[in-house]
């Protein structure tokens, strides 16, 4: 296997959902900055997470930041311009336990480096698990991280995706709010804040909406699944590419201001993620 092919395979399987992931050996899209870090630890490489050349691996004398997420932010980091590196791991369709397993495989064994984990998860569990089960899963995840003294965690709010709490009434031909699910969403976000390091929560609940006086108005055009038909709103789970990147930039910079009182994402480059995909496919399919 060529060096370029080996580099591409180290990232898991970022683009092809019908192909087996090199990290998990199941068919899903998975961008694995952690597997890349593990494979090239200690070597000077062009880092696929921050797009800069540096020594790959966790550093023992500074905070190492790792973002664990799902399709909500899959590949969005590739269009961001970073001042400092952070490692990204995103699994499309991933659940809370999926990300916990990745933490325990790649990060938990690192006992001598300070690692701060940012977790954006829960949308894929929301309709499959009760509130109590989700709370327990998040608590178990926190407790797993807390076993290592140098590791800390922040859980971001869940994205307020219309799919979580809006139902289309076919008879009335209009969307209706499912208040039971909306209350579940709000209670879960409140619970996550209590789990967080220093009770700090990185909020993305307002993305996909606009402020109108004291309330939020849903902006249909900011959601990927919206196709112009009113009934498509109940299927909206992801922000469109532009607002996905803006939301991720917000999370990262909220984090950096808490630690360093400055921003880390200093720009957004359109189409860099597309070019990264073309490069990956060329390397992975010679």
Image (cartoon, rainbow, N blue to C red):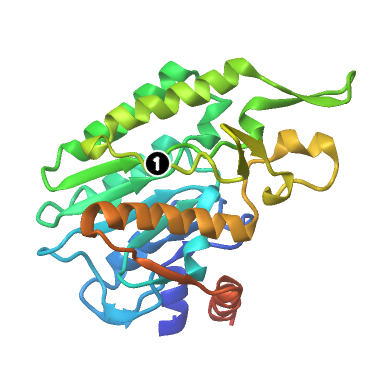
Question: Is the residue 43 above or below the residue 220 in the image?
Answer: below
- State whether residue 255 appears in this view: yes
Provide the secondary structure element on which disc 1 rests: loop
Task: Locate residue 210 relative to residue 115 in the image: left or right.
Answer: right
Tell me what residue is drawn at x 61 percent, y 73 percent: 274
Question: Is the residue 41 above or below the residue 18 in the image?
Answer: below
Q: Nearer the viewer, residue 61 or 106?
A: 61
Image quarter in which the C terminus is found: bottom right
**Residue 82, percent from left and from top:** 38, 71
Q: In which quarter of the image is residue 142?
A: top left
Tell me what residue is drawn at x 63 percent, y 26 percent: 165
Q: Which residue is the extreme one toward the front? A: 213
Q: Which of 19 and 264 is in front in this view?
A: 264
Tell me what residue is drawn at x 29 percent, y 39 percent: 200
**Residue 190, percent from left and from top:** 39, 26
**Residue 178, percent from left and from top:** 66, 19
Label 1: how many Cα within 10 Å (few below 14, some 14–19, many 20+): many
Image quarter in which the N terminus is found: bottom left
**Residue 108, percent from left and from top:** 21, 47
- State whether residue 74 appears in this view: no
Question: Is the residue 161 above or below the residue 151 in the image?
Answer: above
Task: Locate residue 57 relative to residue 23 in the image: left or right.
Answer: left
Q: Name the residue under label 1.
A: 156
Task: Locate residue 144 relative to residue 69 in the image: left or right.
Answer: left
How many numbered discs, if any? Answer: 1
């Amino acid at each position: 296997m060529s060096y370029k092919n080996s580099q591409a395979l180290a990232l898991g399987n970022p683009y092809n959902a019908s192909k087996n992931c090199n990290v998990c050996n199941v068919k899903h899209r998975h961008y694995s900055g952690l597997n890349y870090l593990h494979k090239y630890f200690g070597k000077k490489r062009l880092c696929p997470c921050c797009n800069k050349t540096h020594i790959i691996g966790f550093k023992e004398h500074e905070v190492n930041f790792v973002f664990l997420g799902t399709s909500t932010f899959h590949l969005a980091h590739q269009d961001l311009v970073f001042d400092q590196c952070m490692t990204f791991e995103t699994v499309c369709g991933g659940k809370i336990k999926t990300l916990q397993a990745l933490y325990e495989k790649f990060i938990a064994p690192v006992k001598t480096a300070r690692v701060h984990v940012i977790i954006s998860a829960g949308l894929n569990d929301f309709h499959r698990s009760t509130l109590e089960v989700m709370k327990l899963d998040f608590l178990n995840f926190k407790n797993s991280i807390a076993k290592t003294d140098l590791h800390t965690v922040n859980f971001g709010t869940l994205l307020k995706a219309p799919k979580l709490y809006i139902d289309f009434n076919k008879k009335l031909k209009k969307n209706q709010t499912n208040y039971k699910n909306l209350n579940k969403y709000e209670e879960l976000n409140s619970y996550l804040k209590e789990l967080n390091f220093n009770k700090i929560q990185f909020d993305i609940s307002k993305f996909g909406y606009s402020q109108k006086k004291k309330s939020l108005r849903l902006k249909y055009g900011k959601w990927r699944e919206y196709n112009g038909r009113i009934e498509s709103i109940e299927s909206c789970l992801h922000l469109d590419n532009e607002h996905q990147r803006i939301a991720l930039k917000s999370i990262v910079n909220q984090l950096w201001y808490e630690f360093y009182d400055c921003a880390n994402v200093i720009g957004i480059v359109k189409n860099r993620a597309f070019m990264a995909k073309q490069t990956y496919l060329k390397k992975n399919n010679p």
